[in-house]
Image (spheres, coloured by chain):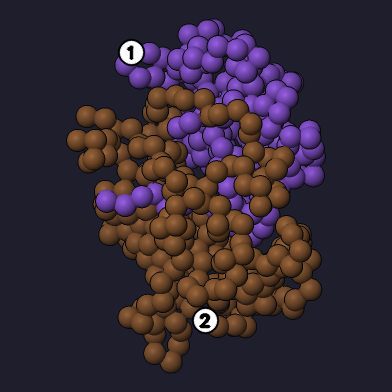
């Protein structure tokens, strides 16, 4: 029996392993409702985090030869990340519950000793009202930090605020 | 049976607020993380195939086959879960500075010679027993602007995925006997001494190849499933 190895920061030089193609989860020809998930990563002063690594994972549509379900994007000078993926549908929750459509997000950057985890839900989904995680967040303003808004046709925005005012709800998973 | 991944053991992970590491000041959340039961989203994860993610197990040569400068080293180890079970066929990503302590990265302005034959990226997969191995150059120490005369100890960055979104791990491997470890706020941020020491690779004469390269062993543990044995 051992203990999980300690996390260390990803640092500012992780781009050495970056492959920009990983930001497009539809690159193998997956069919479905193509969306862009974009947003800015901001620090406690509201300044952009320009060296972060954003990874996403979704269990719907199920991963396949044409859809990896996983992607990675950098943030640019304005702190903006952009990922292209397929819009997920609902997935099973624990017990007999159902989870609203969502994408899991892993945030890694210089200044983060351990990755942070959050989720992107989608504005105006009826299932958001009964999603077990969303329901468990009592403060509507905090709940709203997990809900991506439709910015343009097919473009969903979720800004990630690491600290302070409107701080994103990070999940203890 | 509880198939959730266990919480991290107390003290084995660094806090997010590390006053001695300036970069954390404005980037650590102030609110506690929101508790949630794991769901299929957390207990499953991506699979990576060598077809889409080709193995790059020799970091000592440029794409045209020219040799990088520096001390060749072999790094190998096993990836196990908290119960000692191997984590098979999982992708390991590696990146690091070259022998002079400079990254092949536009943001690295350290005034040390860059090596056109060393990019510093590697990728391997564990075998059925969780073993991995790669060949690289021993990275140099380099200064960073955290505090006066701040230097990062020699280190190699590692990225592990494991079987699930919940087992993601990014860490750094250090070298035994490095005098800079005592002064490094990143290394020292993990409260538990034993947890810190497990980030230091062991010199391994068995792994060392005669007349070729020194061997270092770096074993890694990813989160395990189910209740801990201590909880019965």
Residue displayed at 44% across by 68% down: B201
Residue B16 vertical position relative to residue B159 in the rendered view, above or below: above
Residue B213 visible (yes or no): yes
- State the SS at label 2: strand
A82 or B232, nearer to the observer? B232
Task: Indicate the position of residue A139 as horizontal and vertical percent values.
Answer: 60, 12
Say if mark 2 contacts mark 1, CB within 8 Å. no
Residue to which mark 1 is pinned: A96
Residue at the far bottom in the pictured view: B211
Residue B230 relative to residue B149: left or right: left
Establish whether labels 2 and 1 are both on one chain.
no
Classify residue A75 by image quadrant.
Answer: top right
Name the quadrant of the C terminus of chain A.
Answer: top left
> Chain A's colour?
purple
User: How many numbered marks, from 0 up?
Assistant: 2
Residue to which mark 2 is pinned: B72
Residue A11 relative to residue B82: left or right: right
Task: Indicate the position of residue B116 as horizontal and vertical percent values.
Answer: 70, 76
As drawn, the chain in brown is B
Residue displayed at 74% across by 59% down: B147
Residue displayed at 63% across by 34% down: B29
Tell me how far mark 2 sits from mark 1, CA to CA. Answer: 55 Å
Task: Indicate the position of residue A19 as horizontal and vertical percent values.
Answer: 62, 52
């Amino acid at each position: 029996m051992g203990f999980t190895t300690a996390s260390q920061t990803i640092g500012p030089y992780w781009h050495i392993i970056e492959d920009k193609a990983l930001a497009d989860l539809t690159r193998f020809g997956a069919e479905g409702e193509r969306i862009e998930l974009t947003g800015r990563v901001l620090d406690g002063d509201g300044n952009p985090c320009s060296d972060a690594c954003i990874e996403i994972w979704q269990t719907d549509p199920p991963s396949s030869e044409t859809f990896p379900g996983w992607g990675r994007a950098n943030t640019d000078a304005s702190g903006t990340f952009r990922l292209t993926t397929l819009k997920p549908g609902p997935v099973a929750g624990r017990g007999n519950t159902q989870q609203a459509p969502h994408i899991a997000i892993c945030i890694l950057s210089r200044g983060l000793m351990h990755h942070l985890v959050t989720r992107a839900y989608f504005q105006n989904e009826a299932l958001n009202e009964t999603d077990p995680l969303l329901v468990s967040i009592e403060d509507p303003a905090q709940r709203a930090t997990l809900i991506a808004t439709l910015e343009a046709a097919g473009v969903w925005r979720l800004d990630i605020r690491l600290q302070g005012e409107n701080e994103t709800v990070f999940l203890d998973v | 049976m509880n198939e959730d991944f266990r919480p991290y053991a107390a003290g084995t992970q660094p806090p997010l607020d590390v006053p001695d590491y300036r970069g954390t000041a404005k980037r650590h959340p102030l609110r506690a993380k929101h508790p949630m039961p794991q769901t299929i989203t957390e207990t499953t994860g991506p699979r990576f195939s060598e077809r889409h993610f080709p193995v790059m197990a020799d970091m000592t040569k440029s794409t045209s086959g020219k040799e990088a400068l520096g001390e060749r080293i072999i790094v190998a180890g096993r990836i196990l879960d908290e119960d000692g079970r191997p984590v098979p066929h999982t992708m390991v990503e590696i990146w690091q500075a070259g022998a002079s302590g400079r990254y092949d990265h536009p943001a690295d302005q350290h005034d040390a010679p860059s090596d056109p034959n060393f990019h510093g990226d590697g990728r391997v997969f564990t075998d059925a027993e969780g073993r991995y191995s790669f060949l690289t150059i021993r990275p140099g120490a380099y200064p960073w602007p955290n505090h006066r005369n701040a230097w990062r100890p020699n280190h190699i960055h590692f990225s592990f995925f494991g079987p699930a979104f919940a087992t993601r791990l990014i860490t750094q491997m250090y070298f035994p006997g490095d005098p800079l470890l005592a002064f490094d706020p990143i290394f020292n941020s993990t409260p538990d001494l034993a947890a810190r020491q497990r980030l230091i690779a062991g010199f391994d004469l068995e792994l060392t190849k005669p007349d070729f390269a020194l061997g270092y062993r770096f074993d890694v543990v990813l989160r395990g499933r189910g209740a801990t044995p201590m909880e019965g």
